[in-house]
Amino acid sequence: MSRHDQLAAGLATVRERIAGACADAGRDPDEVRLVVVTKFFPESDVRLLADLGVTDVGENRHQEAEAKAAACADLALTWHFIGGLQSNKAAAVASYSHVVESVDRAKLVGPLAKGAGAREQPLDVLLQVSLDPPGAEGRAGADAADLPALAGRVAEAEHLVLRGLMAVAPLGGDPVAAFARLAELHRSFVSAHPAATWLSAGMSGDLEHAVRAGATHVRVGSAILGSRPRVK
Ligand SMILES: *Cc1c(COP(=O)(O)O)cnc(C)c1O
């Protein structure tokens, strides 16, 4: 099978899974945007995906993302940054990303706003909230209790647009419970920030649970592109 046909098959399967979960939940599949996570995969795959109708791609490492976004600058893609952010790289990340989904501390707000301002384009921001128990190994994301203050900082920053929340289900935990908690957090978040309606949740292994819990964005890599090398 050609790479094109592999990716087409993976995409068709994932789109069916999203449609099935939407049918279960009585949701319109157009409410769920598929972000294809292309980390570790080459520019050539991004081009094939764009040909296959993919509009949104996600990357989690700055150097790789920067190079791929530059190489694919001729494609009308929306680039999502979904990885851990260092504050000294945040302005650079804002210079090629359209959405930064992994904002988890106030220290990132200034550099992101600066990068977006230099590019003269507003940057969509999601706050990443941790669904892990406190002290869990490799925990990423802000504590739920810190979201209001962080949201306030983003909302008042120039060039940044507060769009909603992002989360990853805890490794080895129950995604149904985790996403139910996330949906609850998002409900109270939207009551304070009515325009922040985006909820990015769900990956290859758990996207149905996320869609049933109200995700507006799913981030899917391996179910479309195949398995990645096991390095982080
Ligand atoms: C890698 C990654 C994904 C995609 O994971 P798959 O299991 O390959 O679908 C989604 N979200 C984040 C934050 C990631 O780092």
Image (cartoon, rainbow, N blue to C red):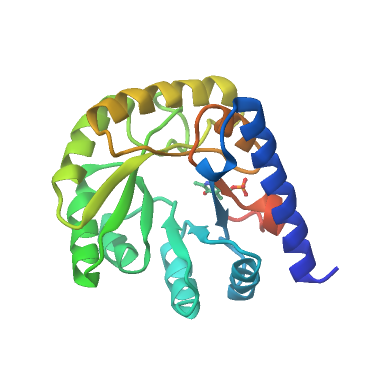
Residue 227 visible in the current orientation: no
Q: Position of residue 75 (x, y in %)?
A: 50, 75
Q: Position of residue 202 (x, y in %)?
A: 56, 38
User: The N terminus lies in which quarter of the figure?
Assistant: bottom right
x 58%, y 74%: residue: 43
Q: Judge by depth and name the residue closer to the eye, 75 or 106.
A: 75
Is 150 situated left or right of 73 in this image? left
x 74%, y 48%: residue: 13
| In the image, farthest residue toward the right | 1
Is 57 situated left or right of 119 in this image? right
Residue 229 placement: quadrant: bottom right
Q: Judge by depth and name the residue closer to the eye, 68 or 210.
A: 210
Q: Position of residue 150 (x, y in %)?
A: 22, 37
Residue 39 placement: quadrant: bottom right
Q: Is residue 204 above or below residue 132?
A: below
Q: Judge by depth and name the residue closer to the eye, 113 or 53.
A: 53
Number of marks present in the image shown: 0
Q: Judge by depth and name the residue closer to the eye, 16 or 83.
A: 16
Residue 128 visible in the current orientation: yes
x 31%, y 38%: residue: 196
User: The C terminus lies in which quarter of the figure?
Assistant: bottom right
Q: Position of residue 181 (x, y in %)?
A: 45, 21
Q: Is residue 213 above or below residue 68?
A: above
Residue 227 placement: quadrant: bottom right
Q: Is residue 91 above or below residue 215?
A: below
